C-alpha cells in the first residue's frame, strides 16, 4: 500500500440500531430460531439469503473458506451439494469437522453452526441433481472443481460440447458430484447492538438437550 493512500479502513464504521436479541426471543430448538431469521432474510429480499460461508481444514491444519448455498435443513442437519473432487470435499474426507456461517449483514445478524459432515447417498443426490436447471446439470459435468485450467475458454468450450452431447434425453448424475449432510451440535446467533454491545447466544447440544448461554460481545 502506498504511504499516500488516503483510504483508511479503520475509519469505516457504523452503528447497529435494528434492535437486540433477548432470551425471551429464543426458541427451544436452535433450528426454529434459524428458520425464523431465514424467513425474515427472505422477506427483506436480501441477496442470496441461503448463501453460507463454509470452513474446512486441510491435512496441514490450514483453514479454507468459500461460499456455498444451503439446499435443505431439518431439526438436526443442513445440506449442501458440491463436486466430490473439490478442495472442500477432499478436506472433509480426512477431517469431517466443519463450520457454516450465514452473514445477514443488512439485518445486522449472523448465525454460525459447528458440526460434522457426512456424504449423502447417490439416491439422495440424484433426486436433487435432476431438480436443478438443465444448464446447471451440464455445468456440473463441465467443471472439475478446484482443478487448474489455462483459460475460461476451455471451460466454456467443454460446456458447449457437453450441451450438444446431452442435447436429447436426461443429463445423468456425474459420479464425481454429490452432497453433504452437516449434523450440528453448536449454533451461535449474533444480533448487532448499539455501542458495540452486541447480543450473542450460543446453543450447545448435551445429549438430547440444548443448553443456551449468553456470550459477551
Image (spheres, grey):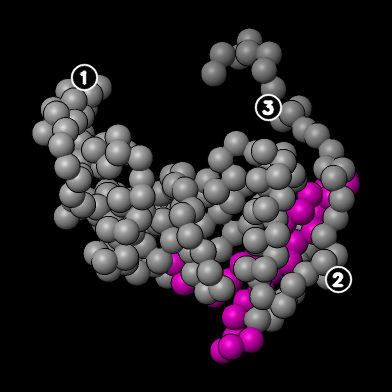
- For label 2, count other residues whose C-alpha is less than 10 Å away and answer few (under 14), some (14-19) or many (20+): few
Mark 2 residue element: helix
Residue drawn at (40%, 66%) of the image? 181
Q: Is residue 192 part of the magenta span, yes or no?
A: yes
Does 193 lie within the magenta span?
Answer: yes
- The CA distance from mark 2 to mark 1 is 55 Å
How far apart marks 3 and 2 lie (CA) works out to 37 Å
N-terminal label among 3 and 2: 3
Q: Nearer the viewer, residue 177 or 202?
A: 177
Specify start and end residues of the magenta stretch as a single range.
182-209
Q: Earlier in the sequence, mark 2 or mark 1?
A: 2
Residue for point 87% across, 50% down? 19
* Residue for badge 3: 9
Horizontal side of 74 relative to 16 (left or right) equals left
The 10 Å Cα crowd at callout 1, few under 14, some 14 to 19, many 20 or more, is few
**Mark 1 or mark 3, which is nearer the start of the sequence?**
3
The foreground one among 4 and 175 is 175
Read off the residue under disc 1.
Answer: 153
Which numbered dot is residue 24?
2
Q: Are marks 3 and 1 in contact (CB under 8 Å)?
A: no
Label 3 packing within 10 angstroms: few (<14), some (14-19), many (20+): few
For the point 44% across and 61% down, the residue is 79
* Helix, strand or loop under label 3: helix
Amino acid at each position: 500500500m502506498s504511504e499516500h493512500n488516503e483510504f483508511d479502513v479503520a475509519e469505516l464504521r457504523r452503528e447497529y440500531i435494528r434492535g437486540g436479541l433477548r432470551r425471551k426471543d429464543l426458541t427451544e430448538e436452535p433450528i426454529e430460531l434459524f428458520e425464523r431469521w431465514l424467513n425474515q432474510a427472505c422477506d427483506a429480499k436480501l441477496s442470496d439469503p441461503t448463501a453460507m460461508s463454509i470452513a474446512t481444514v486441510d491435512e496441514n491444519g490450514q483453514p479454507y473458506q468459500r461460499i456455498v448455498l444451503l439446499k435443505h435443513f431439518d431439526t438436526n442437519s443442513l445440506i449442501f451439494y458440491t463436486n466430490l473432487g473439490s478442495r472442500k470435499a477432499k478436506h472433509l474426507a480426512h477431517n469431517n469437522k466443519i463450520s457454516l456461517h450465514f452473514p445477514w449483514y443488512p439485518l445486522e445478524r449472523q448465525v454460525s453452526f459447528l458440526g460434522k459432515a457426512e456424504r449423502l447417498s447417490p439416491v439422495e443426490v440424484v433426486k436433487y441433481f435432476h431438480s436443478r436447471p438443465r444448464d446447471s446439470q451440464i455445468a456440473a459435468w463441465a467443471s472439475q472443481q478446484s482443478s487448474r485450467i489455462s483459460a475460461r475458454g476451455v471451460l466454456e468450450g467443454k460446456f458447449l460440447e457437453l450441451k450438444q452431447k446431452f442435447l436429447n434425453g436426461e443429463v445423468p448424475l456425474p459420479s464425481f458430484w454429490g452432497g453433504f449432510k452437516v449434523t450440528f451440535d453448536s449454533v451461535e446467533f449474533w444480533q448487532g447492538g448499539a455501542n458495540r454491545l452486541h447480543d450473542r447466544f450460543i446453543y450447545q447440544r448435551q445429549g438430547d438437550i440444548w443448553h443456551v448461554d449468553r456470550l459477551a460481545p
